[in-house]
Amino acid sequence: MKTLCAISGSKDKQTLWLENSGHVLPLEPDAHIVFYATEQFIQKQLAIGYLQKPIANCQ
């Protein structure tokens, strides 16, 4: 995991360690944590103007 973060070109990155999930995250017990963290990341990028166009509302 540290290697992936080290080679990523992004300045804004975060590691999210999930103890109760395996490889197929959308089907795992911690899926809601991943979905929430992803939503928060996208909202942050929109707030700072990194993403110019909002993505479609998936609700």
Image (cartoon, grey):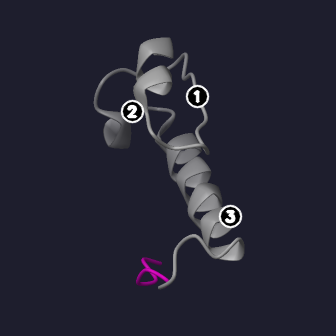
Q: Residue at image x 55%, y 16%?
A: 19
Viewer-proximal residue among 45 and 9? 9
The answer to whether residue 30 is above or below residue 53 is above
N-term-proximal mark, 3 vs 1: 1
Would you place residue 47 above or below residue 25 in this image? below
Q: Of helix, strand and loop, which one carries label 2?
A: loop
Where's residue 8, x and y in %?
43, 33
Say which element carries label 1: loop
Q: Residues within 10 Å of mark 2 (few under 14, many from 20)?
A: some
In the rendered image, residue 21, in percent from the top left (x then y), is placed at 44, 23
13 over 43 or under it: above or below:
above
Which segment is the magenta one? 54-59
Circles 3 and 2: CB distance less than 8 Å? no
Whole-angstrom CA distance, mark 3 to mark 2, is: 25 Å
Q: Residue at x 41, y 25 (%)?
A: 7
Image mark for residue 44:
3
Q: How many marks?
A: 3
The disc labelled 3 sits on which kind of residue?
A: Lys
Circles 1 and 2 in contact, beta carbons < 8 Å: no
Extreme-left residue of the structure: 24
**Which sits in the foreground, 42 or 26?**
42
User: Disc 1 designates what residue?
Assistant: 15
Give neighbour class at mark 1: few <14, some 14-19, many 20+ (Cα, 10 Å): few
Which SS type dominates the magenta stretch? Answer: loop
Question: Is residue 11 left or right of 10 when viewed as pictured?
Answer: right
* Mark seen at residue 28: 2
